[in-house]
Image (cartoon, helix red, strand yellow):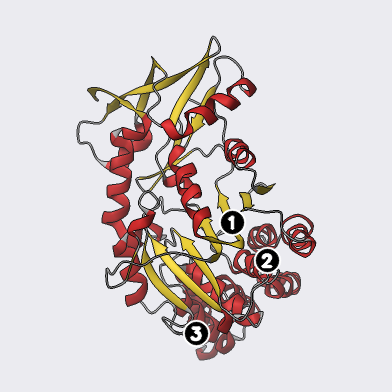
Amino acid sequence: MTLSGEIYSFEEAPLYQKSAETYIETGIDIFDLKNKEAIPNVSTSSYPHAHSIVKLLKRVKRSDKKYRILECGAGNGIFARHFLFACKKEGLLDKVEYLISDFNFRIVKDLRSRNLYQEFKENVHFKYLQLDLLKIEECCDIKSKPYELENLDLVIMNYCLHTLPCSIYKKSSGQLEKLYIEFLEHSDRQVQVLKEFWMEEKKVRFEAKEKKYRDFIHSIADSYKDEQKIHFNFNALESLDQLFEKLNPNGFIYISDIPTMDFDSKISYRAFAGAIAYIINSQLISNFIEHKNYWDYIHNDFILYKHILSKSEPSFQFKKALKENFELNNPCVLFCEMISAMKIFVSDQSHRAYKALLNEFISIDDVSVYSKLYQAIYYMKIKNFKKSKEFFDQAEKENFFNTCPVHQHRKKLDLYIEREQLLKNL
C-alpha cells in the first residue's frame, strides 16, 4: 500500500470520482450477474414493487392530461419495463408518459438498442432522457436536445440518492466540525480495491461551503449527541429541492434506498462492482421535509427504506393505498420471501408444495423473468419437458442483462432430457 498523502472532504475525495468513472465505463454490464459484485436491484426492480407504485399513482387526481412520470437513475431499466406492464394491467398505459432517465448516457442508449420496451411505443408511452441530478436544468433527450422537466405527477428514485456525494460532520463540544479524510490506497489504483480503502478522519472546524443548508443543519444539530457523526448529503437535498419545483400541485416523489446503516461505522459507504453507495441519512431527509412544511411518509422493512414526499398532505384514498401497499400487504417483501422459499424445494418429489407456492408467486408476479423461471422449474419437476422448455425460452428472452440465473437452471433441464433419452434407448 502507498499513502496518497492528500486530505479531502468526503464529497471531493477520489473515492467519488472513481465510482462515477466506473459506472460510466462499465455501463449496463455493472448490473450483469456475470460480474461477481453486480449492483443488486432484484427487489427494487421487481414487478410487484413497480405494481405497488402504479396503484398509488391511480390515487392521484389527473384531468384529461397524461400522468407524467420521471424515473431518475433507471439503471438496467427493468423497473421501467415492469412499471409499464403494471400500467397496462391497471388500464393506465395510454394515460402515462414515462420518462426513463439516467446520469450515464451510455446506459440510456444501451436500453434503447436492446429493445427493452418493444411492447410499448416510444414517445407515446415512454421517452429516454439523460439526467444528472447535480445538473437537473441540463436534462436532454436521446438526441441530446434540451428537455425541460415540468408538471410531473411522480418522480421515482430507486437506489438513486445514495450515489450522490455526501459530507460528514461531527458534533464536538456543541459545535459542528467537518470531517476530512486521508486515503490509503493500493499502488495499482484500481477501482476494484475500493473496499480495501482505509480512511483516517481529521477534524477541521466547520466551514459553511454549503451555505444554502447551513442554517438547516445547525437547526437540527441539537438532536444529535456529542461526538456523533452526521452524514449530510446536501446534494440529495438540493436535488429534492429542484425536483419539487418540477412537480404539479398533486405530485409526489417516491424514494427507495438501502436501509440506513450505523452512522458511527468507520466505513461510510458500500462498494458494488467498484461503484459506491453512500450511507443515506433517512432522518435528515425527514427533518428537511418538515423544515420545508411538506408531507412525508416513511416505511422501513428489512429490504428497503421508503420515503414518499409531497408538497401538501394527500387525500385519504392515497394514504389508504400507502397502508395497503407498504404496511399491510407489502408485495416487494413477499416477492423476496417467496424467492427464498422456492429455493428450498430441490427434489422432484416436492413438486406439489412447490406448485402451491408458485401459484402464490404468480398471483403477485406473472410478468418477470423470475415468474417464467419458476414455472419452467415446476414443469421440469413433473417431467413435462416440452412445457418447461417453453418457459425457459420465455425466461431467457426476458433476462435482458443476466439479472437472473436462468442459464444454470436450464442446464438441469438439458441433463434431465439427456437422461430420459438414455433410459429410452436401454
The residue that mark 3 highlights is 422
Mark 2–mark 1 distance (CA, rounded to whole Å): 10 Å
Mark 3, secondary structure of its residue: helix
- Residue 390 % position (x, y): 53, 86
Residue farthest top in this picture: 173
Res. 380 visible in picture: no
Q: How many marks?
A: 3
Number of residues whose C-alpha sits closer than 10 Å to that of mark 1, classed few (under 14), some (14–19) or many (20 or more): some
**Going by the image, does 104 lie left or right of 214?**
left
In the rendered structure, which disc, 2 or 1, sits on the residue that comes first in sequence? 2
Mark 1, secondary structure of its residue: strand
Give the residue type at disc 3.
Leu
In the rendered structure, which disc, 3 or 2, sits on the residue that comes first in sequence? 2
In the rendered structure, which disc, 1 or 3, sits on the residue that comes first in sequence? 1
State which mark lies toward you, 3 or 2: 2
Camera-nearest residue between 350 and 376: 376
Circle on res. 56? 2
The residue that mark 1 highlights is 254
- Residue 228 % position (x, y): 56, 20
